[in-house]
Structures are given as C-alpha cells and as structure tokens.
Amino acid sequence: MSDIRIRTEDPGLEVAYFSDLCNGDYEYLGVPDGDLRSSFDHCSDIVLRADQNGFKNILLPSSYQVGQDVMTFAAGVGPRTSQINLLTAIRMGEMHPPMLARSISTLDHILKGRLTVNIISSDLPGTVMDGMERYRRSSEVIQILKQAWTRDEIDFQGEFYNLKLNSDPVKPYQQNGGPLLYFGGISPPAQELCAEFCDVFLMWPETEDRIKETMKGMSEKAATYGRTIDFGYRVHMIVRETEKEAREYARRLVSRLEDDRANEIKHRAQDSRSAGVLRQDELRNMADADGFIEPCLWSGIGRGRSGCGSAIVGDPGQVLEKMQRYVDMGVRSFVLSGYPLLDECDYISRYILPELKLVSFPEVQGRKPAREPVTPLTTGPRK
C-alpha cells in the first residue's frame, strides 16, 4: 500500500449495505417477484434490517425506474433508523444547487449527521449531454454545495450557474465540510472530478491488479490537488457455510435468466453504456467456464444487471480473506449487497460483520459533531 495514499489510516472499515430503490431485487435474477418490488415498505425493511444488523452505511441508488425517489425515501425512513448512515445517490443538475444544498442540509438535520452523499454525473432522464459538459456542470454544483455548507455566503460565477446569496438556509448538521461525498467512475473526467472534490472513490469489481492500478492512479490525481481520498469497493456477495453451498446458490440465482430478458434489464438503466459498465462486460467475457474472473470473484450477476456486475462467492473464511486483500491495498469502505437483499443482509451479518472492526466515516473523519451543533435549524439565533 506504500504507493497508495489514503485519508483514513484507521484500520476500521465502513461496511455498508444496499437498498434497491430502482426495481432490482430478485430471488431469481430477472424474474419479477411482487413481494420484492421497490415499494416504500420493502425498501424500508431492507434499511431497517441493515441498521439492526450493524451495517454502518447503506447506499440508496437513484435511477429513472419504477421505485422510490431517493431524497423523499431517505427523509421517510431516516427517523426510523438508529445508527446507520444513509448514502443517498443524487444526480447533479436535477435540482437548482442552492435548493439542493438546502434539501441535503434538511436531511442531514433529520438524521442528526448520519447523511453521506453519492454524487452521480449521468444524463438527466430523457436528455443527452456531452460527457465533458456534464462533468463541468457537476463540478460547479459540487463547488456551490461546498460553499453553501462552509461559508457565510454563496458567491459563484461559472459556465452554468451565477449565484450570490447568503447561506443561512443551507447550513448542515455535519461540520468541517458538510456530508462526505462518494463518487464512482473510471473515465478520465470522472476521476478528475473525484480527485479534486470528493472524499471516497467507489470502485466496481475488477481483478485485483486492476483495482490496485486504479487506486494508485487516483491517489496520484488527488495528490496533485493537495488532497487524499479514501477508497470504497461496491460488490455483491454470496456467503454460505461452505464454498459448495455458495457456488450452488450462485448457479441457482441465474438459473432462470434468459438472454433477451437479461439484455432488457441491463439497458433500462441510465448508465448501461458507461465506461464502467462496458469494462464490467469486458471482464465477464474473460471469466472461466463457471463465470469466475479470479478466485472467489464471480461475474454472473453482470449478465442481467447494469453497474456492479460481480459477487464475492465463498465460505466465510474465503470471503474474509478476499476482503482483507482489498484492505491491504487501502480499501476502507465496502458497499455490499446480495439477492434477495433481506436474506443476504442476514448472511453477511452472521458470517462476516462479527469478524471486522466497523467504523462510521462521518465520525472517523470528524464530520459528525459529538454534540448538537449551533446552526439556524438547531440553537443558532433566529434572524
């Protein structure tokens, strides 16, 4: 890890789970089940189970598909949780930046500092924008958010936004910079955006040599801005008492997935032709006859899912050893999931979580204050 600089040297791990707000939970991949639809009740059950099971964060995705709007959902479920952070995926450009800052600040106060933000820089539904232009817009939104959360005034002049207004209405609960920003993407402009402005770079499953290469490059990019970042690994998981059981379940999961249906599911997502998804497809084409890219890393899920397309598969010892290899590289955050989401949440909490030292990133990085902060929404003077 010597050539990869990371922000969080603490050996503890932020282990997060995933609640599919976007119509993607299955018992058999690609076979719709009415009991697993992305309703408020089902998605809430997943969040509450992950909270009870000790996960420290949970990714709430955003996509223009049948399911839940992420900010509305987070505001609804947040007060019912006790210790878990909510990693809300927010597409840059969907909302006027000062109002977005205010929405995030409101949610941060509702959660009392348990909010993290996953920055999304994809096209808005129904529109297509040049990639470089999209990232320039995202850059401006992030800079406005940071001004809103850390200064007395928003004063920004750019290509897309020209703003000058006071920032009292958007002061967050979290101090020292506001909610942590997570970001994923392998294209050069995506990586530059994360290196300059974000806190955690999320990676999808790849071979270990590619993961290490990506981390080294991102560490060097962040250093050019005088920054360090942390690294997260987004991956599915199938952990069972024995390797045989885990592999059998993997085969069962895709046993009813037909090619036409798989292709339809993959390409209904906004990011289905992104550089990251295409690289997942490339790796799956290099897998062995059973679909394994390398030991314990199975690519079968990518047949019928856009985005993260592989799972760590094995018994508890194998899974922990695989995770430790990423930790040794410098990974400090994992975003895990499995099918169905409620069932795999229990398997992971039974076999994996007790063996790890778990931490909350907002606490470790000094964003969540030990006591209630003085803000206009807490005890600050009314004006």
Image (tube, helix red, strand yellow):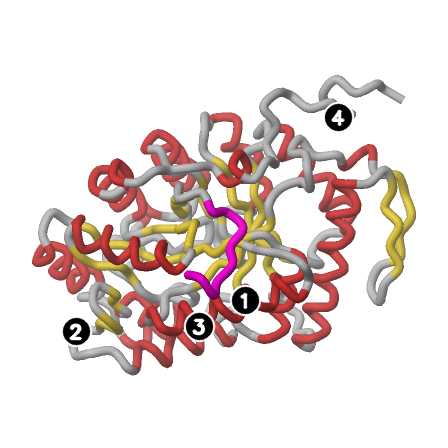
Label 1: which residue? 218
- The CA distance from mark 4 to mark 2 is 55 Å
Amino acid type, callout 1? Met
Read off the magenta span: 1-9
Q: What residue did someone put label 2 on? A: 290
Residue 206's spot in the image, x, y percent?
36, 70
The tally of labels here is 4
Q: Name which residue type carries label 4.
A: Thr
Check disc 4 and report its element: helix, strand or loop.
loop
Q: Position of residue 77 (x, y in %)?
A: 50, 33
Q: Secondary structure at mark 3?
A: helix
**Residue 45 among those drawn in magenta:** no
* Tag 3 and tag 2, C-beta contact below 8 Å: no
Q: Residue flagged by tag 3: what amino acid is it?
A: Glu
What residue is rendered at 76% in x and 44% in y? 99
Check whether the beta carbons of the residues at disc 4 and disc 2 lie within 8 A of each other.
no
**Mark 1: secondary structure:** helix
Q: Quadrant of residue 373?
A: top right
